[in-house]
Image (spheres, rainbow, N blue to C red):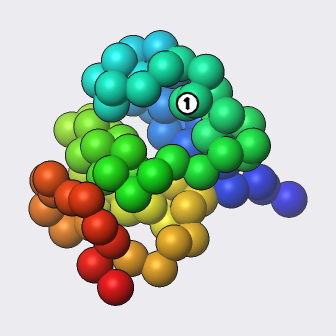
Amino acid sequence: MTKPNDKLRAALHLSGLSQSELARRIGVDQSQVNKWVAGRMLPTYPQLCRTVTILRGVEGLEDCEPESLGFKLGYRITVEPECDEPPF
């Protein structure tokens, strides 16, 4: 059975980004990204927005959504957001 965060790990692999590079681009510590990949922590909504926006710039991940990364949070990100609150 595939764990949800295996999808984030696969997306990082496909993108060629290291956890450190993704963390730098998002503005968080690498250990935080490691916790997301390990399934020990969920990103905040703004962090998830930035992660999806970064991964959408990678060939093959243009349609990236939180759910495709294994985060079943009940919302979609449709633009490059400067978001503070989820659009419930």
Q: Amino acid at mark 1?
A: Val
Across and down, in percent, residue 38 comes to 73, 37
Residue 16 visible, this orientation: no
Q: Residue at x 16, y 56 (%)?
A: 81
Hey, which quadrant is residue 72 in on the image?
A: bottom right
Left or right: residue 7 compared with residue 80? right
- Choose between 21 and 42: the one closer to the eye: 42
Left or right: residue 31 compared with residue 28? right
Across and down, in percent, residue 73 comes to 51, 72
Q: How many marks are shown on the rendered structure?
A: 1
- Choose between 47 and 14: the one closer to the eye: 47
Q: Is residue 84 above or below residue 61?
A: below
Q: Residue at x 27, y 37 (%)?
A: 54
- Choose between 68 and 52: the one closer to the eye: 52
| Extreme residue in the right direction | 1
Across and down, in percent, residue 24 comes to 35, 18
Hey, which quadrant is residue 88 in on the image?
A: bottom left
Q: Quadrant of the N terminus?
A: bottom right
| Secondary element at tag 1 | helix
Q: Residue at x 49, y 39 (%)?
A: 11
Across and down, in percent, residue 31 comes to 61, 21
| Extreme residue in the front direction | 84
Q: Which residue is mark 1?
A: 33
Q: Is residue 61 above or below residue 20?
A: below
Q: Is residue 37 above or below residue 66?
A: above
